[in-house]
Amino acid sequence: MGAKQDELPMQTENQQNEISKAKREIMQKAADLFAERGFGSVGISEVGEVAGLGKGALYYHINSKEELLYSIMTDYIIQLIAAGHRILETEPDTRKRIIALSESFMATMFQSRAAMTVCFREVHSLGSEKRETVLSLHGDYQKIWEQIFEEGALAGECRDVSRIETKALLGMYFYSFLWVRVGGRLSSKKIAQDFSNIVLAAVMVDRPA
């Protein structure tokens, strides 16, 4: 059974607002480096070089290389959770909720592909506490989908969807960074539509044509 909306963490947008524009630029450049070469193969001085900052200026914005990695891994999932809460609050229809979540995910993936790559390849590089927080955030995002399926089933709009099925459907989204071409001829919205069609066909009582 999915958690109710008021049980989900509500600190996400505040966490996002704590990140300065300068730090976001550092995070993006570092994510590109980590995605291309691996976290362990990139020195903090190299991050400073691509960011155009000396060591002192760089450490003004970050506490450590691990903290930088943690920020990269959590920022995009915090964005997804915040968007998910807004969808839960403003859209009651199950079909429209699924479409909106799909569009939100793909827009974030297009913007944060390097960060997603780093998260899925390098989560083992974090200390245990930070690693558990990253995994917990992904669990919180899954709960949003579980809540939508649960409420949709109660409303007679979709069938009962198991947690395993939810994980499988989300795997389709989260691993899309491996093969979806960002900057290709298809927009994030068109790809989101194709993905949501798969989910709708799998869970809705009245399947789309």
Image (spheres, helix red, strand yellow):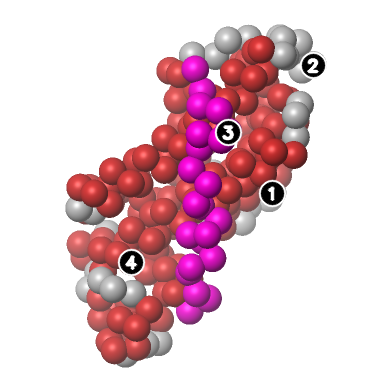
Q: Quadrant of residue 49?
A: bottom left
Q: Nearer the viewer, mark 2 or mark 4?
A: 4
What's the mark number on residue 187? Answer: 1
Alpha-carbon distance for marks 1 and 4? 30 Å
Find disc 4 in the rendering and name its residue: 68
Q: Which residue is mark 3?
A: 5
Please tell me how many numbered marks the rendered image carries: 4
Residue 94 location in percent, x, y?
A: 71, 24
Q: Secondary structure at mark 1?
A: loop
Q: Quadrant of residue 164?
A: top left
Q: Name the kind of residue labelled 4 in the image.
A: Leu
Residue 193 appears anywhere in the view = no
Q: Residues within 10 Å of mark 1 (few under 14, many from 20)?
A: some
Can residue 184 be seen in the rendering of this structure? yes
Please name which of the two marks, 1 or 4, marks the residue nearer to the observer: 4
Label 3 crowding class (10 Å Cα cut-off): few <14, some 14-19, many 20+? Answer: some
Would you say residue 17 sits in the magenta stretch?
yes
Q: Position of residue 137 (x, y in %)?
A: 41, 43
Which tag, 3 or 4, sits closer to the chain's start?
3
- Mark 2 highlights which residue? 209
Mark with earlier residue (1, 4): 4
Q: Which of these two is toward me, 138 or 18?
A: 18
| For marks 2 and 4 on the same chain, the one whose residue lies earlier in the sequence | 4
